[in-house]
Amino acid sequence: MGFKQFMVLGFGLLMASQSIANTGLEGTWQLISGEYIDAEGKTVSYASTDMQALKVLTPDHFSFTSMKGEQFWAAGTGTYEFKDGQYAESLLLNSFGEKVGASFVFQAQVEGDMWYNSRWKDEQRIEYEVWQRLNPSATE
């Protein structure tokens, strides 16, 4: 095999490995709405708590920071998978007392620059999130 063919093969393998890792979620996302079920079983909207959050995703890691109003609320980072409409995070570091490896699994759908997540427990939706991609032109 000549040098040119070797370079073409190498470039092809590089592009294939990048497309395998690309989940379509890479970038920065801003939480725009949602709700969760609190410890008393009541539905709480993020708007009512002035919840704000940013999530940054690389091809295989995530990191988020959230605030309630001007007060720090939570942060976490770890790895994730997005496959067949399921988004699963596995924590490495966090501020809210979960063990390393704790997993959170969402049914997820991406429509353009919008990302919709629902997390369920015992057939009850316990969390719903709507994220919007920031700087969408950076992914084109």
Image (cartoon, rainbow, N blue to C red):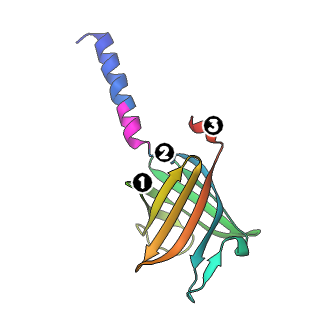
Q: Secondary structure at mark 2?
A: loop
The reply to whether dot 3 and dot 1 touch (C-beta < 8 Å) is no
Badge 1: how crowded within 10 Å, few (<14), some, or many (20+)? many
80 lies above or below 139: below
| Quadrant position of residue 90 | bottom left
Residue at the (29%, 17%) spot, across then down? 6
| Quadrant position of residue 34 | bottom right
Q: Which residue is mark 3?
A: 137
- Whole-angstrom CA distance, mark 3 to mark 1, is 21 Å
Amino acid of disc 1: Phe
Instruction: Tell me how many marks there are.
Output: 3
Q: Which residue is mark 2?
A: 24
Residue at the (50%, 67%) spot, across then down? 118
Residue 92: image location, x then y, percent: 46, 62
Amino acid of disc 3: Ser
The label shown at residue 115 is: none
6 lies above or below 17: above
Quadrant occupied by the C terminus: top right
The reply to whether dot 2 and dot 1 touch (C-beta < 8 Å) is yes
* Label 2 vs 1, first from the N-terminus: 2
Badge 3: how crowded within 10 Å, few (<14), some, or many (20+)? few
The magenta segment: 16-22
Q: Which residue is mark 1?
A: 82
Of residues 24 and 18, the one nearer the viewer is 24
Q: Is residue 19 shown in magenta?
A: yes
Q: Secondary structure at mark 1?
A: strand
Quadrant occupied by the N terminus: top left
* Label 3 vs 1, first from the N-terminus: 1
Residue 100: image location, x then y, percent: 43, 68
Q: Is residue 105 shown in magenta?
A: no
Residue 91, visible in the rendered structure? no
